[in-house]
Image: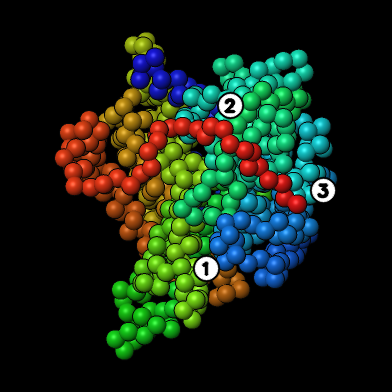
């Protein structure tokens, strides 16, 4: 198969799994089309009083449990969450936060699920990963959305009681390209027989239940699998740069028999189930990112006041003050993005597939930058481990650990690069519906002619709407007081963003999908505008209790975001993308192998893509 044919096949598999219907409105989708629908996110949807009360009680209980029963330094040192901590979380109901009360769970709103994860993530990111992988992408979420009533009654109560679940999609040679999936599920009587190897199975080492993606013929299907089934072997537990307490492994399936009744949905729906699950499942990452960054504010404030250099507290020096301002403003915006998106998930009036993806992308990128600035602000102490600091008599601040732990967030549940492509596909869906064959490089001349007529009608109506809007009126959004200027900027810029997307489609047509740097900047601009909106909406709500202070945080964040947006727009058309791609090709061809002279590679010899062979089963049961 040629490279072009392989790409076309992978693209087709992804398109078949994608949700194509928009039955509910989407704030972010309209934003990318130049239509700033503030009414879709403001006023913010509210929760019923009983749901809010139960959520507050659980978050308080979680705080008490973490404070009295969890030692994050021990988890980092031993690279394992103690069994008694897992059992304590189960007794608290933490494994059933999102599971309905009718199935033995707490039935918490997403808002409080995210607030709980924000709290846990600020204290022990590995613990947050254990809980979120179980509920956001493990067995509960797919069954809630696609499971039969029989499946829900069989498996959800077990998950709520604390039987840990894991999600198995990735393989040694399969990442974001599902067309290459090689694990198979063959129907044999009343069972499917599974064979294959899965990689990076978060929770997989200790899981009781698995969601497994496998190929049924040419299509991909999803199954609930008992982790102790004969033929399943956890070949090893993986070690990572951070999140040392997570139980992540390599799982092998050899003639594993799974009852046909454990098929989730229908045959061939596996990828759709995975992608739909992630629409709300991704909300867990913005929550932990917000928790990390809010913790960084506390450390930055305390250290900025405590450390004195050149006669002043370091936080009063401008070079450090700008870092503190970035950390604080970013923390407020990330919390705003997390809360707005989770409230929209609870409200269910909006389709939040783009919002959830933007929240994940933006939060993972900005929180890592904020933690990196904290390490820089702390200097040598930021690079030193908390254990080493404490051993020599200083406060054991785990800044370097938080930075290491947060790095995976830019890769988890879709890397930033893949998120850019996914969001782009959703954001330009209206364009592709109108002009899909026009920019499709494989379209026939007749198909292009028909698309041209269809596109002409669409753009004749759409383009005039991008000329002027409420953002040009100085009195618009007056209810937001000092933040109204920022919302006017968002409205004007959304129209500019839509025009830029149209220019890109006109310029590159079918080649646009390969202009990934251009499209990535388009998405990043949209993410900044979404975050600005969320920050302004949160500040307006918070001001009722906190006065002017939320406005100050949101205003500073918006000023910072506007500078980033201006830079991104400038780089849409003035960049080194062409030179970069050409140079990368030369590097790959070995043209510059002389650059590699004078160094030694410390890598351990072995194949680039491989799987462990032999060895004992390292799966362990939480006792």
Q: Nearer the viewer, residue 88 or 620?
A: 620
Residue position for label 1: 295
The circle on residue 196 is 2
Q: Nearer the viewer, mark 1 or mark 2?
A: 2
> How many marks do you count on the picture?
3
Residue position for label 3: 104
The circle on residue 189 is none
Q: Colour mode?
A: rainbow
Image coordinates for residue 581, horizontal then vertical, percent: 24, 36
Q: Nearer the viewer, residue 386 or 134?
A: 386
Tell me where residue 19 sits by quadrant: top right
Image coordinates for residue 523, horizontal then vertical, percent: 40, 44
Residue 550's place in the image compared with 594, above or below, is below
Cβ atoms at labels 3 and 2 below 8 Å apart: no
How crowded pointer 3 is (Cα within 10 Å; few <14, some 14-19, many 20+) is rated as some
Query: Does residue 537 appear in the picture of this structure?
Result: no
Image coordinates for residue 138, horizontal then vertical, percent: 65, 41
Q: CA distance from mark 3 to mark 2?
A: 33 Å
């Amino acid at each position: 198969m040629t490279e072009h044919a392989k790409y076309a096949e992978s693209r087709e598999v992804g398109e078949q799994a994608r949700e194509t219907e928009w039955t509910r409105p989407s704030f972010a989708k309209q934003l990318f089309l130049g239509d700033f629908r503030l009414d879709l996110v403001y006023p913010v949807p509210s929760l019923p009083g009983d749901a809010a009360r139960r959520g507050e009680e659980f978050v308080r209980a979680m705080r008490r449990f973490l404070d009295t029963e969890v030692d994050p330094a021990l988890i980092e040192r031993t690279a394992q969450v103690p069994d008694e901590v897992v059992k304590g979380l189960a007794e608290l109901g933490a494994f059933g936060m999102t599971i309905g009360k009718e199935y033995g769970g707490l039935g918490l709103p997403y808002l409080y699920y995210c607030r709980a994860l924000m709290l846990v993530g600020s204290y022990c990111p590995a613990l947050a990963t254990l809980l979120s992988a179980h509920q956001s992408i493990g067995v509960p979420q797919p069954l809630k959305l696609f499971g039969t009533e029989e499946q829900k009654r069989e498996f959800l109560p077990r998950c709520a009681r604390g039987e840990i679940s894991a999600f198995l999609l990735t393989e040694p040679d399969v990442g974001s390209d599902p067309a290459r999936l090689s694990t198979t599920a063959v129907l044999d009587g009343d069972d499917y027989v599974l064979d294959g190897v899965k990689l990076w199975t978060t929770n997989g080492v200790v899981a009781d239940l698995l969601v497994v993606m496998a190929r049924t013929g040419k299509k991909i299907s999803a199954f609930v699998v008992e982790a102790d089934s004969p033929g399943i072997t956890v070949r090893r537990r993986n070690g990572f740069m951070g999140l040392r307490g997570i139980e992540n492994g390599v799982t092998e399936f050899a003639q594993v028999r799974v009852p046909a009744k454990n098929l989730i949905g229908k045959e061939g729906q596996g990828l759709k189930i995975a992608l739909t699950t992630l629409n709300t499942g991704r909300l867990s990452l913005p929550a932990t990112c917000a928790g990390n960054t809010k913790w960084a504010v506390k450390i930055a404030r305390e250290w900025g006041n405590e450390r004195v250099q050149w006669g002043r507290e370091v936080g009063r020096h401008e070079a450090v003050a700008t870092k503190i301002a970035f950390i604080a403003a970013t923390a407020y915006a990330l919390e705003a993005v997390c809360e707005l998106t989770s409230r929209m998930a609870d409200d269910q009036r909006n389709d939040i597939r783009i919002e959830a993806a933007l929240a994940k992308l933006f939060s993972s990128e900005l929180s890592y930058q904020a933690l990196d600035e904290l390490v820089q602000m702390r200097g040598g102490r930021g690079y030193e481990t908390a254990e080493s600091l404490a051993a020599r008599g200083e406060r054991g601040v785990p800044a370097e650990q938080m930075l290491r732990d947060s790095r995976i967030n830019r890769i988890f549940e879709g890397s930033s690069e893949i998120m850019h492509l996914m969001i782009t596909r959703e954001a330009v869906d209206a364009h592709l519906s109108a002009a899909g064959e026009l920019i499709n490089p494989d379209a026939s001349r007749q198909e292009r002619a028909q698309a041209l007529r269809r596109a002409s009608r669409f753009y004749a109506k759409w383009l005039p709407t991008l000329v002027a809007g409420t953002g040009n009126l100085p009195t618009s959004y007056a209810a937001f007081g000092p933040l109204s200027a920022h919302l006017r900027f968002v409205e004007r810029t959304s129209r500019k963003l839509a025009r830029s997307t149209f220019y890109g489609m006109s310029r590159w047509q079918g080649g646009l999908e390969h202009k990934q740097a251009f499209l990535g900047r388009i998405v990043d601009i949209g993410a900044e505008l979404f975050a600005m909106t969320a920050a302004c909406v949160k500040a307006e709500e918070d001001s009722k209790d906190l006065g002017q202070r939320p406005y100050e945080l949101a205003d500073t964040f918006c000023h910072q975001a506007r500078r980033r947006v201006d830079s991104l727009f400038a780089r849409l058309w003035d960049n080194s993308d062409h030179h970069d791609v050409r140079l990368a090709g030369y590097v790959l061809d070995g043209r510059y192998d002389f650059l590699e002279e004078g160094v030694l590679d410390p890598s351990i010899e072995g194949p680039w893509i491989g799987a462990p062979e032999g060895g004992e089963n390292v799966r362990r049961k939480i006792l």
